[in-house]
Image (spheres, coloured by chain):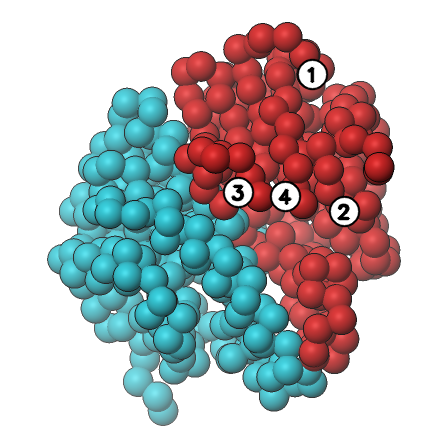
Chain colours: A cyan, B red
Amino acid sequence: MPVDHAAATLLSAFDNVPDFAKGAVRDLRVRWALEETGRPYCPQYLDAMKPKPEGYRDWQPFGQVPAFDDGTVRLFESGAILLYLGEQDERLLPRDPASRWTATAWLFAALNSVEPALMPIVNLDFFLAGQPGTVEARPAFERMAHRQLKSTEAALEDKEWFAGAFSIADIMMACVLRNVDHTDMLSAYPALSAFKARAEARPAFQRARADQLAGFREPT
Amino acid sequence: MPVDHAAATLLSAFDNVPDFAKGAVRDLRVRWALEETGRPYCPQYLDAMKPKPEGYRDWQPFGQVPAFDDGTVRLFESGAILLYLGEQDERLLPRDPASRWTATAWLFAALNSVEPALMPIVNLDFFLAGQPGTVEARPAFERMAHRQLKSTEAALEDKEWFAGAFSIADIMMACVLRNVDHTDMLSAYPALSAFKARAEARPAFQRARADQLAGFREPT
C-alpha cells in the first residue's frame, strides 16, 4: 500500500511512461513484494520521458526505476531489492537453505536466463520499432527466446511455484514473463501460462498493479 | 584450483565449445571466485556441442553451465552461486550491510542492466550470424548497449571497485564486460577499461582462465 506521508520505505516509480509500459514498469516487482507482506511504502515519482532530477543517478545509476531506501539500506536493481525484502520475511523467501537457494537460483534465472532472451522482442517491438533490420531480425531472436521458455516450462512442470512455497522467484518470473504480454509467445507453454495466471490472481499483485496504474498522471 | 579426485565442491563446465567462447564460458565466474578464496573444486565436464547427459537439467534447467554442488547446497545461475560463495567469505562480499547491499545491487546490475544490453551484440555477431536482418539491426542494439555502458562508466568514476573492497560485483561486472572483447566498444570508456584490466590482472582471474582453457579437449 503506497502512503503519501513520510514513511520509512521509499520506492522510486514513474508517473509518466509510454502507454505500452503502463502496468509493466519494474517498480511493480517491488510493490508486489511489499504488498505480499503488508509493508507500507512511499512512492517517489519521476517522469520517464524527462531528464532525471539532479542526484537521482546517485540512487539509481541507470536513471531507471525502481530504487529503494528504507532508512537502513539504499539500493537499486529489482532483483537486489527483492532479495533484501526476502531476507526480512520468510513469506517471500523460505528459511531452510535448500529452498532458499533454489528460490535464489530462480530469481537469478528469471533475470539472467529468461529476461535477456525476452527483452530483444520488447526492444524490437517497441523501443527500436521502425529502425533498420528490426523486422527481419525478429524471428531469430524469437527462436532464442523460445529455447529459454521451453527450458523454463520443463523445469516448472506441474509445480505450483518455482521453489516450493511462493517466493520472490515467482514474483520475478511472473513479471519477466509479462514482458511479452503483447505477443502470443506464452501460448505454447501451458505450465508457464497457468503459473503466470496463478501469480497474477494473487491479491498482492492486483493491488500492486492497481497502485502502479493509479500513479500515472493523466495525459495532458 | 581444480582437483581431479573426489572433492566436496563440484562445478559443471564445458570441455568442448566453439573457439570464440574459449576463456569466456560462464563457469569462469565461479572458478574465479573460488580461486580468490583458495577453495578447491572438481570440474564436471560436459560437451557444449552435444545433448546433455540424462538428468543434467535437474541440476541446470537450461542445459548450460555453471551448476554447483558443495554437498550442502546444489544450485545453478552464476549470480546465485557467487552470492552463495560471497555469504561464506567476506573477501568476496563485505559484511557491513551498506557495502554488502551495494555489492549485491551491482551484482544484479551486471546481470540485468549491463549483460542483457551486451548479449544482443554477442548473439548478432556469433550465434545468429548470417541470419536475416542481423547486420542491419546491429547499430540499434549497439546504441542501446552504449547507453548502459555510459551509465556504468559514470557510476564507477574513479573508484577502484564497484562497492568499496573487491567483491563478487567486480567478478561479475568484469566477466560481463568481457562479452564484447571481440569489439572496440569499451574503448570509449576509460574507467571501465581500466577496471576490467585491473580485474583481469588478479592472480585468481589468471588461474581461473588458465584452468578453463586447460579443460578444453584438443580438436580431433
Measured along the vertical axis of the image, is residue B82 above or below residue A206? above
Cα–Cα gap, marks 4 and 2: 12 Å
**Mark 3, other Cα within 10 Å: few <14 / some 14–19 / many ≥20:** some
Cα–Cα gap, marks 3 and 4: 11 Å
Chain-order first, disc 4 or disc 2: 2
Residue B185 in percent (x, y) is at 81, 59
Note whether residue B11 is visible: yes
Q: Amino acid at mark 1?
A: Pro
Residue ID for mark 2? B18
Cα–Cα gap, marks 3 and 1: 22 Å
Q: Amino acid at mark 4?
A: Lys
Dots 3 and 1 on the same chain? yes
Q: Residue at x 69, y 39 (%)?
A: B25
Chain-order first, disc 2 or disc 1: 1
**Mark 2, other Cα within 10 Å: few <14 / some 14–19 / many ≥20:** few
Residue ID for mark 4? B50
Chain-order first, disc 3 or disc 4: 4
Q: Chain of mark 1?
A: B
Cα–Cα gap, marks 2 and 1: 22 Å
- The single residue placed furthest to the left in the displayed view is A203
Q: Chain of mark 2?
A: B
Residue B202 in percent (x, y) is at 79, 25
Q: Is residue A108 left or right of residue B163?
A: left
Query: Which sits in the foreground, B153 or A138?
Result: A138
Residue ID for mark 1? B2
- The single residue placed furthest to the front in the displayed view is B220
**Number of callouts:** 4
Residue ID for mark 3? B63
Q: Which mark is residue B208?
A: none
Q: Residue at x 76, y 63 (%)?
A: B125
